[in-house]
Image: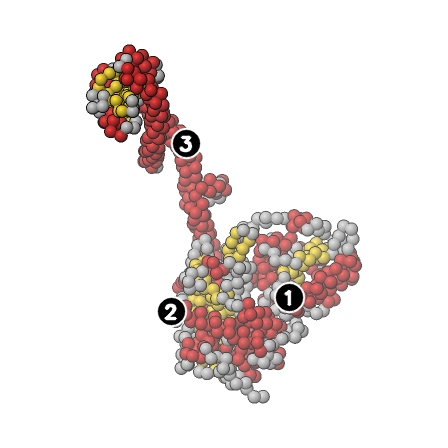
Amino acid sequence: MRHFRMRLILALIVGITVLSLASTYFEVLARKHVLRSELLRRTEILAASHQPYMEEALASGSTPQITAVSQEMRKHEEALGLAIYDTSGKLTIFDGPATLIRALPPNAVRQALKTGASSNQFGHTDGQDWLVEATPLHVNGQLAGALVLLEDAGYIRGEASEVWRQTFLRIVFSVILIVGVTVLMIRWFLMRPITRLAERLRLLRMGNPEHGILDEVDDLSLFTPIAREVENITESLMEARAAAAAEARLREAGENLWTAERLTVHVRQHAGAGRIFVVSNREPYMHVRQGKETVCVVPPSGLVTAVEPVLRACDGMWVAQGSGSEDRLFVDSHDRLRVPPEDPRYTLRRVWLSSEEESGYYDGFANEGLWPLCHIAHTRPIFRASDWECYQTVNRKFAQALLHEMEDCPEPVVFVQDYHFALLPRMLKAVRPDARVAIFWHIPWPNPEAFGICPWQAELLDGLLGADLIGFHIPLHCNNFLDTVDRVLESRTDREHMTARRRGHTTTIRPYPVSVAIDPTVTERVVWNKSGDEVLRDFNIKADKVILGVDRMDYTKGIVERLQAYERLLEEHPWHRERVTMVQIAAPSRTRIPSYADLRRRVEATVEQINTRFETPDWRPVILIERQCSHEEVTNWYRASDICLVTSLHDGMNLVAKEYLAARDDEDGVLVLSKFTGAAVELRDALIVNPYDTDGVADAIHRGLEMNATDRRLRMHRMRRQVMEHNVYRWAANVLGDLRELRIETVDVRPEAVLVHRAEGPQRKRA
C-alpha cells in the first residue's frame, strides 16, 4: 500500500505540473501577442503624428528641428530613439543609442522605401528587445527617405517571466493542496474501509462474524460492487458454516431432515449427464417499472423456493412466460438471461405471448375452464373452442422453445408445473423420447364424472400421459386420475404400481405433498421486526385476540363462508365481541374474470354487513385488506394472530396452513383447517372443519379461542415437526429422485407430432 500511495502521489505531481506548464505556455503566447499588438498600435500612432514634422524638417534641412522632435518623442515610455534614412537606405541622421541604431537590420527600411507604406519588425540585439517602425517621408510629393522609430520591447519579456513565476508558485501550491487532500482521502475513504473489510473477513474466518464491524458497512459505499460481492461471500460462508453445523447436529441426533444445501448436494450427485429444465407459467424473476426505475422482483411463489436450489446446483434452465413490463429489455437475442441477478447460477428463458394468447390460454381455458373443473366449489366451468385453440398454441410454443434449448443436451430432465401445460409432456416426448419428463399437478384432480364435463378431456389426458411421472398432492387425486384414464382412454392401468400404459409408453403416478421452506436446522428463534401489538396498532385494531385469514380473492378459498362462520360466532358467543377481531387478507386475483369480480363484491358486502351489525365506537369486527402483501407483512400477521382460518371449499394442498406453522417459531397459535384441503391429510392436530358447516366452523373458532396454552403448544409442536420433516426441499428431492430411477422406454414416434398434435388428438372411448 505504501508503494501504491507513492506512485499515486508522484502521478498527481507529474500530472498537475504538465497540465500547468502546458496551460501557462499558451497563456504566455497569448499575452505576448496582446502586448505586441498594443505596442505596434501605439508606435504607429506616434510615427504618424511625427511624420509631418520630419518631412518639413527634411525639406528645410533643419537638423536642430529633427533633434528637438527626437527629444520630445523620447519622453514616451518605450521610445529609445529615431533615425532618418535616405532613399538608398543609408542612415543619415539619428538620435539615441548609436550602437543599437547602427546594428538595426535594414529590412523594415527597405520595405517601407519599396512599398511607400509603413513597415515594422521586432528584434533582439545584445540583450535588448526592440521594435522598429519605418515610415516613408515625402518632400514635394517625392520619396525623400524614411523615418525609423526605435521602441523598447523588453517589458514584454518581463511580463512573460512574471507569468512563469506565478505559474511556478501556483504549481507548488496546487501540488501541496491536492497531494494533501489525496493522502487524507486515501486514508479515510480507502484505507479505513479496506482495513474494516479485512477485519470483517478476519472475524468471519475466526467464526465470530456478528461483532460490531458487521453493522458498519456504510464505509464500503464507495466500492459498492466490491461491497456487494463481499456481502454475498460473507452470507454464503455464514450459510455454509451454519448448514455444516446443522447437518452435524442432525447426524448427531440421528435425524434425516432436508435442507436447501442437502437438496443441492443430492442433485449434484444424482443429476447425471442430463440438464434440468423447469417449465412454469410464472417466471421466478421479472423486471417491472417502479416509478422512474426498473427493478427485478421475485413474485411470491413457493415453487421458486423449491426448485431454485435444483437449478442452481446443476446450472439448469427455467422456461416461463415473460410477463414483466420491462422483461424484453434484459434478455439476449435468444430471449435468455442469467439469474439470480446478484449471483447468476442458472438460465431463465422467457417465452412471449400475445395479449390474445394470454387471455385465451390463461384467463380462458386454464382459469375459467380447468380451474373450476378441478375444484368442487360449485362454480360452473366455461369451455370455449377459441380458448382451447389458444391453449394448444401456447403449449406448442413452449414445446418449441424447450426443444430448441434441448437440442444439444443428451437425456434432458424436464419438470413441468401445473395445469397450464397438460399437452406439453406428449409434445416433448414425441420429438425427444430420451427426455425424462415429469409434471406436477398443483390443483385437485376430480372424479371421472366431474372431469367428463370438459369437451377435450381425452386430449388433455393423452397429453399428460406423455410424461414419465405425474405428481399429485394426495393419493385420492392419484386414484381419481387413474379412474378418469380408465373411463376415457384406451390404456392399461396398474393400481398396484400406480401406472398407466398407452401407446407403448408407461406413466407413473405418485403423491408428492408439496410444502414450504421451513429450515429444520434453525435452532434460534427469529427476532420479529414488529411485535403483535405494533402490527395491530398500524391498523388501529383494539382486540385481545386476532383471527386471521390469508388468501387470494378466489371462490375456492371459502372467504364468504368463513366470514359467515365468524358472524355466527359473534351471535352465539357474544362475550367475544369487542375482544376478538378478524383480519382477512384477500390479494386481488384474476380480476379480468367475471366470477372473480362478483366474488369480490360478495366479500365486501359480507364484511360491511358484519361491521354494520356489530361495530362499536372502539371496536371493528372485521378488517379487510385487499392488496398484495409482502412476505414480511404476511409473516408479521401470522405471528400476531391467535387463530389462522384455512377454510377452503376445495384445495390441492393450501400452503397458507403450512406457512402459518413455519412462521410460528414460538410454537403457539391454533390452526382451523378445512377437511377439503390436501393439508388436512398431514396436519391432523389442526381443528378440522367442514367449511360448508357454518355452525361447526364457528364452534371450532370458539374452541380455539378457549384452548389452554398447553394444548395449543403441543398441537403446534407436532404440526411444525411434520412440516419440518416434509418440507419443500424433500418434495423436490422425491420428485426428481423418482424421475431419475424410472426406466425410460423409447417408442417410435413421428417428430412432426409436436406440430400436429391438435389434429391427432386421441379418440374418446365409447361408453
Quadrant occupied by the C terminus: bottom right
- Residue 181: numbered disc: 3
Q: Nearer the viewer, residue 103 or 49?
A: 49
Residue at 57% in and 69% down: 359
Residue at 45% in and 53% down: 342
Q: Nearer the viewer, residue 40 or 302?
A: 40
Q: Nearer the viewer, residue 565 or 244?
A: 565
Q: Secondary structure at mark 1?
A: loop
Q: CA distance from mark 1 to mark 3?
A: 64 Å
Q: Earlier in the sequence, mark 1 or mark 2?
A: 2
User: Mark 2 packing: few (<14 Cα in 10 Å), some, or many (20+)?
Assistant: some
Please name which of the two marks, 3 or 2, marks the residue nearer to the observer.
Answer: 3
Q: Position of residue 87 (x, y in %)?
A: 22, 23
Residue at 61% in and 56% down: 629
Q: In the rendered view, would you say 423 is above or below 301? A: below
Please name which of the two marks, 1 or 3, marks the residue nearer to the observer.
Answer: 3
- Residue 68: numbered disc: none
- Residue 409: numbered disc: 2
Left or right of 450? Residue 74 is left
Q: Nearer the viewer, residue 215 or 361?
A: 361
Q: Are marks 1 and 3 in contact (CB under 8 Å)?
A: no
- Residue 554: numbered disc: 1
Q: Secondary structure at mark 3?
A: helix
Q: Position of residue 310 (x, y in %)?
A: 45, 62
Q: In the rendered view, would you say 417 is above or below 76? A: below
Q: CA distance from mark 3 to mark 2?
A: 58 Å
Left or right of 664? Residue 283 is left
Badge 2 amino acid: Cys
Badge 3 amino acid: Val
